[in-house]
Amino acid sequence: MSAGTTGVVGVVGGGQLARMLHQAAISLAIRVVVLDPDPGCAAAAAGAERFDGTWTSADDLVAFANSGVDVVTFDHELADPDDLVRLEAASPVPVRPAPATKVLAQDKLVARTALEGRGFGIPAFAAVHDVAQVQAFAAEHGWPVVLKTSRGGYDGRGVWIVRDAREAAEVLAAGDGFMVEELVDIREELAVMVARRPGGSLRSWPVFRTTQVEGICTEVILAAGSPLTDRARALAERLAEHVELTGVMAVEFFVDAGGELLVNELACRPHNSGHVTMDSCITDQFEQHLRAVLDLPLGATEPTVDVAVMVNVLGGAAPWSAEDFADAVATDRTSLHLYGKGHRPGRKLGHVNAVGDSVEETLGRARKVAAVLGGSD
Ligand code: ADP
């Protein structure tokens, strides 16, 4: 550790999550170094140090771990789980979360299997290789069913609702590594963020209500008063213990028509649903992740406001103009977090956090700012 530095965190990937980890690291005098082949990646563009290499190479991962960082953690789920196991064996530097935990966020079938029969509600599921297996599952659970690739899906890519055997055959023909799930009648989607240190101490944040449009998370509401808060938090904390989490994790839940909580996905890293913590909780998910992976005491997670929301800024048909940007920053009680990424229609370019007194007004204000930057207002 060099003079004046309190720790060096190596982050596999230099995207927006690494950028915001770097932002949080500055006030604690922690250094963030990212493994990324792109000199212009979002984290390096914001001043994080960069180690030139790629997460698709096991050798680069090992060289990165041995480059002087105190711990290796992640911006994304893209490294091959087998390479991470090799990395853990080849380097004395801790990998947090450990590969055996990380794989639960990388492989949906492994995650479902790890939670099955353990008292966590999950949708009925099965691994499938052919249409006959999908038909057998549907005979028990009814059509439509949901087909998913167990690895590599994100933002709704890799998820198909199929109504019959013909549609199932079309999806199966286009790839491999599928699983099938019952189609849950979703009343709402919730997320709980939880942080855990290597020794086991943990803290969670209040529940967030999340909105997905075509599989992409678009809005998050910090719903401190939700009647499901206590149950969802307790489940997320028990899950963090069960999977021996180190760092922060997002647990995404479906609330079904009967009001039951079903675990959908795990993300073992800071997560889009947790961005709302940046301007509304004593410790946000990025600082907490740094604390957890460096095995430092965790910070308080209480909200400091009554209402907080997050709306993603997705690229519109054209980049925003100087006037749009001035309009966006003119809005009170609203914070802009831009990732410094080049414009592309539909690309996540940043997010807007807003705080206020009523959900309706606060959400309206945040949506307006996101729309100005997304070119649709
Ligand atoms: P991703 O990896 O793309 O986030 P998810 O498994 O979270 O994939 O699925 C994306 C979205 O698809 C979910 O937010 C939900 O709206 C819908 N979905 C996924 N699984 C089911 C299911 N079993 N029943 C109903 N809807 C589902």
Image: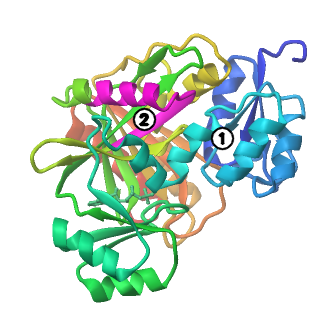
Give the residue furthest to the left: 258
Q: Does residue 150 appear in this view?
A: yes
In what quadrant of the picture does the C terminus appear? bottom left
Q: Nearer the viewer, mark 2 or mark 1?
A: 1
Residue behind mark 1: 74
Residue behind mark 2: 276
Identify the image quadrant of residue 38.
bottom right
Q: Position of residue 343 (x, y in %)?
A: 61, 64
Asked if disc 2 and disc 1 are in contact, CB closer than 8 Å, the reply is: no
Q: For the residue labelled by badge 1, is the local secondary structure a helix, a strand or a loop?
A: strand
Q: Position of residue 276 (x, y in %)?
A: 42, 35
Q: Position of residue 258 (x, y in %)?
A: 9, 46
**Ligand 1 is in which quadrant of the figure?**
bottom left
Pick the residue in front: 250 or 62.
62
**Residue plotted at (40% across, 23% down):** 204
Q: Does residue 47 appear in this view?
A: no
Amino acid at the residue labelled 1? Phe
> With 204 as the anchor, is 260 left or right in this view?
left
Label 2: how many residues lie within 10 Å, few (<14), some (14-19) or many (20+)?
many
**Residue plotted at (33% across, 75% down):** 133
Magenta-colored span: 232-252
Amino acid at the residue labelled 2? Val
- 237 part of magenta stretch: yes
Q: For the residue labelled by badge 2, is the local secondary structure a helix, a strand or a loop?
A: helix
